[in-house]
């Protein structure tokens, strides 16, 4: 009989875009893989990975205790029925409530802390509650992976995990064959692109203000945004605001994309001035894999991808003027110097962030948990 692995995530989109390599590797290694997530437009793509899919309703952004208790019960009932050999949790609610449910059933758990977002930047009641839930959920996890050293240190210092159970991953990893090195376009003006969920804490406002500064100085630069607009999220940039920026002529909005390779291939530099508590930003890894120089904030998660002056530039968080200076320096740089930056970025991805590293660490962690 095949060993069974249940993986919990907050969206089917996340599975298809970030975990496809791991799912395929587990299936190829002989495991039965069950993917658990709320349904969205990517369910068919998820099924094509060779796993079985179970829809799980989930209020991703809500904090209503009744709905969260209902989610805990649904996860407990699902795991009791499936009886997997191991549960893999990603993102906040599948990590917390999936781990609690699995632990009550004696199912071993491996967690992945993919980033802490805004809640760990505060010290209010909600932040303290989330920390308490993490402490309960991760107490008996067999392995807790982190994507940067700062998050790992924070959890250790707060007593949320023990050092014996922790491990480090280079983000989600990148399939370097799917994101191949691409020639920089020969074009004027130079094109910049920010790819992210359009949250204020991703540095979207600073990016737009930097674009204004460049425009006022007469610097030839084309600045674009690519990412999902969530009008229901108070932390997000509204569609009205984005349209106002477009009407002003300061940025272009490219909508959303399930495959960013085309958009990355058309630009000279990818920018992410995020001061959000990132894990390791996937968009930076994708852009670097394709040979694009990067500009990102000297902030948690972001700084791990960029060696300043080597494969890109680091800017001060929440500082539009400094970001504008770094963008202008990229414009003023000779084309061959930008190309060299991009090539060094590709080499960094191949050495430090290849998807195979992540997959091997997961396979080893699972093998250590399950009896022969």
Image (spheres, rainbow, N blue to C red):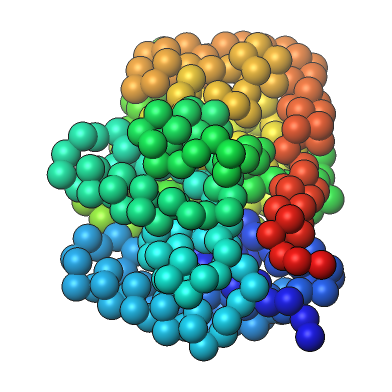
Q: Which residue is drawn at 21% across and 34% down?
A: 123
Apparent side of residue 14 relative to residue 267 in the rendered image (left or right): left
As displayed, is residue 128 above or below residue 259?
above
- Quarter of the image with the N terminus is bottom right
Q: x, y (%) of residue 197? A: 43, 49
Q: Nearer the viewer, residue 248 or 112?
A: 112
Q: How many marks?
A: 0
Determine whether 197 is above or below 278 in the image. Answer: below
The x and y percentages for residue 348 are 76, 28
Residue 68 rendering spot, x and y as whole percentages: 27, 69
124 horizontally vs 246: left or right: left
> Which residue lies most toward the left here?
125
Q: Which of 282 and 356 is in front in this view?
A: 356
Tell me: residue 270, above or below residue 216: below
**Drawn side of residue 81 relative to residue 57, left or right:** right
What residue lies at 84% left-to-right and 70% top-to-bottom?
28
Of residues 102 and 310, the one drawn nearer to the viewer in this rendering: 102
* Residue 17 occupies quadrant: bottom right
Q: Residue at x 19, y 66 (%)?
A: 65
- Point 81% across, 36% down: residue: 350
Residue 233 locus on image (x, y percent): 26, 55
């Amino acid at each position: 009989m095949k060993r069974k692995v249940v993986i919990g995530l907050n969206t089917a989109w996340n599975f298809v875009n970030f975990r496809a390599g791991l799912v395929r590797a587990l299936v190829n290694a002989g495991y039965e893989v069950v993917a658990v997530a709320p349904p969205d437009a990517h369910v068919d793509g998820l099924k094509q990975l060779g796993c079985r899919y179970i829809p799980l309703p989930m209020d991703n952004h809500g904090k209503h205790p009744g709905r969260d208790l209902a989610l805990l019960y649904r996860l407990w009932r699902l795991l009791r029925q499936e009886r997997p050999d191991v549960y893999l949790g990603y993102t906040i609610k599948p990590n917390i409530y999936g781990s609690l449910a699995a632990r009550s059933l004696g199912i071993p758990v491996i967690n992945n802390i993919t980033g802490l977002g805004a809640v760990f930047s505060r010290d209010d009641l909600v932040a303290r509650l989330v920390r308490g839930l993490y402490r309960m959920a991760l107490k008996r996890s067999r392995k807790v992976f982190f994507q940067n050293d700062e998050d790992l240190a924070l959890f250790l210092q707060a007593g949320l995990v023990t050092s014996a159970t922790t491990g480090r991953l280079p983000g989600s990893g990148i399939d370097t064959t799917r994101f191949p090195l691409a020639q920089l376009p020969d074009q004027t003006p130079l094109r910049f692109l920010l790819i992210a969920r359009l949250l204020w804490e991703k540095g979207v406002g600073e990016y737009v203000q930097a674009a204004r500064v460049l425009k006022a100085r007469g610097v030839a630069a084309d600045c674009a945004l690519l990412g999902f607009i969530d009008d229901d999220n108070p932390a997000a940039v509204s569609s009205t605001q984005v349209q106002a920026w477009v009407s002003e002529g300061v940025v272009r909005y490219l909508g959303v994309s399930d495959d960013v390779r085309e958009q990355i291939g058309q630009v000279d530099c990818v920018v992410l001035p995020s001061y959000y508590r990132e894990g390791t930003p996937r968009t930076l890894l994708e852009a670097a894999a394709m040979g694009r120089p990067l500009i990102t904030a000297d902030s948690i998660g972001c700084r791990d991808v960029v060696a300043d002056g080597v494969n890109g530039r680091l800017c001060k968080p929440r500082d539009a003027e400094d970001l504008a200076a770094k963008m202008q320096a990229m414009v003023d740089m000779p084309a061959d110097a930008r190309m060299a930056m991009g090539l060094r970025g590709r080499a960094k991805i191949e050495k430090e962030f290849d998807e195979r590293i992540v997959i091997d660490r997961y396979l080893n962690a699972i093998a250590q948990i399950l009896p022969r």
